[in-house]
Amino acid sequence: MSEKEILFMNPVFTHNIWGGTKLRDVFGYKIEGNDIGECWGIAAHPNGTCTIANGTYQGEKLSDLWEQHRELFGDTKGKVFPLLIKIIDAKADLSIQVHPNDDYAAEHENGSLGKMECWYILDCEPDSKLVIGHNAKTHEELEDMVNHGRWSDLIREIPVKKGDFIQIDPGTVHAIKGGITILETQQNSDITYRVYDYDRLSNGKPRQLHIKQSLDVITVPAAPLSDCMIETGESKVNELQKLIECKYYKVFHEKVEGEAAFNQEFPFLIVSVVEGSGTLNGTEVKKGDHFILPYQFGTVRLQGNLELVASTVAE
């Protein structure tokens, strides 16, 4: 047995007009309501911070652990815990939106981090699509399309399927469409600019749009789809496979059938079990569990039938 404890999290949940019931019905989270949009599985943000569910640090906030016990995270630098992991259940379409980069957010959003994120599609209905990017060739054309509501001309929709992996750089116009469930790995930021919200009402009023900020940060022309749709190759059983490595994170995927092992060689490793159940070094883990394997955890021995998505900081 490793002497290092697995840091299991108590997730935080959000209610959203586009949310559904899958987080309760499919993932087993004990949360009421029919509009549960997001499970913040690993979070240390002012808008939601997980508490530790077990062991020495039980009941403590992840944000406090980051401040007071940086040795658990390999003494990784940074004022705030760097990543935020969510499971998103889009029963209806999310707004068409864009995120700023670090420089813009620091200047315009009280020193916040920007938001780079990526999506692993856990489930979706047949013929599902995502909004990724746009068709404007110039900034003038972008402004004209936005100001005149030419949304069908502007937005780029692409077909997606379960197991697809998508990278969303800051400045990328994007939207999750209804019927899609994703695991999102992102910078620890909650800054989103809404470009368009289908003229929906929330409590009788349209939700706030952020047209000026959106036009400030949208990349024109949009990056090619090949920059967004990440080729992950064939899924190999019982092997920790890297999906992406970028400026802010590395993301991995593993499908365990029977027994598997790897070395936790990173400053820390965030793990979300997205399917099945089994054990990790003798401790039971199951679908919906989110935990952190701290610095120098050592050998990770997995048994059972399960699928996990893991991440750490880029070094």
Image (cartoon, rainbow, N blue to C red):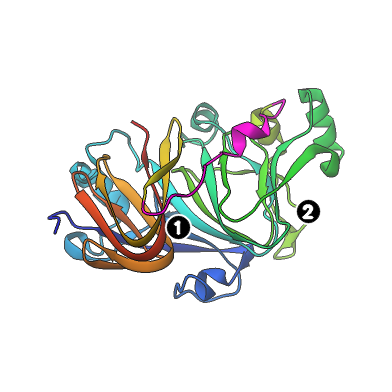
Above/below status of 223 relative to 268? above
Residue 287 in view (yes/no): no
Quarter of the image where one finds residue 304? bottom left
- Quadrant in which the N terminus appears: bottom left
Task: Give the residue type at disc 1.
Answer: Trp
Q: Position of residue 277 (x, y in %)?
A: 37, 69
According to the picture, the residue beneath numbered tag 1 turns out to be 40
Which of the 4 image quarters holds residue 211? top right
Q: Quadrant of the C terminus?
A: top left
Residue 52 is left or right of residue 20, and the answer is left
Q: Amino acid at mark 2?
A: Tyr
Under tag 1, what secondary structure?
Answer: strand
| Percent of width and height locating residue 34 | 60, 74
* Total tally of numbered discs in the picture: 2
User: With 138 as the anchor, is 222 left or right in this view?
Assistant: left
At horizontal 66% and vertical 65% (from top left) the residue drawn is 91
Residue 76 point in image, percent of width and height: 27, 36
Q: Which residues are magenta?
A: 220-238
Q: Is residue 68 magenta?
A: no
Which residue is at the front of the view, 175 or 288?
288
**Residue 92: mark in rendering:** none
Residue at (21, 66) in percent of width and height: 282
- Residue at point 31% right, 50% down? 63
Q: Is residue 206 left or right of residue 257?
A: right
Residue picked out by circle 2: 198
In the foreground, 260 or 187: 260
Residue 180 x/y as whole percent: 63, 59
Question: Which element carries disc 2, helix, strand or loop?
Answer: loop
In this rendering, the answer to whether 74 lies above or below 255 is above
Give the vertical position of 167 relative to 206 (above or below): above
